Image (cartoon, rainbow, N blue to C red):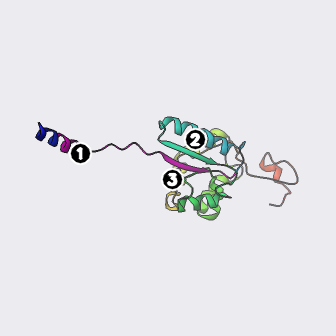
């Protein structure tokens, strides 16, 4: 009997132990306030990611530049490991790291929202997402809600290309 208990104890000690799953914490940065679509989307991402992970994932949202003061610093933070997830725009990154990312920000390029999504969800959008990987980031979606004209004027409203006539850009 004693020999059996020794063998049983040895067998139990040799069994692999199952460690409890570690909680993974992600730091998500935005540069805009709590009522901005980037931050409200970040809060929704936190809610969904934590719920779907069954508690294995924890997302800390840092809005309003708390973790990184601008989108360039967000990407640099991702490269350094101080930022895990960030809401950022292609033009901000393109201006510093990859000019091809500026292509989608040409004023009046799109005919409407459906056109925007068709471009971003198609080969052009996939190519732009792939351009982030050498920069140390892996995008997983495009957002919307900002509008797609990108023209500001201190003279008058710009609703169509004709509205730019006589203005210096």
| Residue 54 pos. (x, y %) | 47, 36
Asked if labels 1 and 2 touch by Cβ distance under 8 angstroms, the answer is no
How far from the left and from the top, in percent, is residue 134?
A: 49, 61
Disc nearer the start of the sequence (2/1)? 1
What whole-number distance in Å separates the C-alpha atoms at marks 2 and 1? 40 Å
Name the N-terminal-most of marks 1 and 3: 1
Q: Nearer the viewer, mark 1 or mark 3?
A: 1
Secondary element at tag 3: loop
Q: Nearer the viewer, residue 35 or 57?
A: 57
Q: In this view, does 153 lie above or below 45?
A: below
Give the residue at mark 3: 138
Residue 141, x across and y down, in percent: 55, 45
Q: Which of 1 and 35 is in front in this view?
A: 1
Q: Mark 1 points at which residue?
A: 13
Badge 3 vs badge 2, beta-carbon distance below 8 Å: no
User: Which of the marked residues, 3 or 2, is nearer the chain's N terminus?
Assistant: 2
Where is the N terminus found, in terms of image quarters? top left
Labels 1 & 3 near each other (Cβ < 8 A): no
Q: What's drawn in magenta, residue-wise?
A: 8-31
Q: Is residue 70 left or right of residue 28?
A: right
- Callout 2 secondary element: helix
Tell me what residue is drawn at x 84 percent, y 47 percent: 157
Q: Name the residue under label 2.
A: 46
């Amino acid at each position: 009997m004693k020999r059996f208990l020794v063998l049983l104890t040895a067998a139990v000690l040799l069994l692999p132990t199952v460690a409890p799953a570690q909680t993974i914490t992600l730091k998500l940065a935005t540069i805009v306030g709590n009522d901005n679509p980037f931050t409200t989307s970040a809060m929704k991402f936190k809610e969904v990611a934590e719920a779907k992970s069954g508690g294995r994932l924890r997302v800390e949202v840092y809005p309003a530049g708390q973790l990184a003061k601008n989108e360039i610093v967000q990407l640099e933070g991702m490269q350094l490991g101080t930022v895990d997830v960030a809401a950022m725009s292609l033009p901000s990154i393109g201006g510093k790291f990859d000019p091809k990312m500026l292509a989608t920000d040409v004023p009046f390029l799109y005919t409407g929202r459906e056109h925007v999504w068709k471009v971003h969800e198609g080969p052009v959008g996939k190519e732009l997402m792939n351009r982030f990987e050498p920069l140390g980031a892996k995008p997983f979606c495009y957002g919307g809600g900002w509008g797609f004209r990108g023209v500001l004027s201190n003279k008058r409203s710009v609703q169509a290309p004709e509205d730019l006539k006589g203005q210096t850009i």
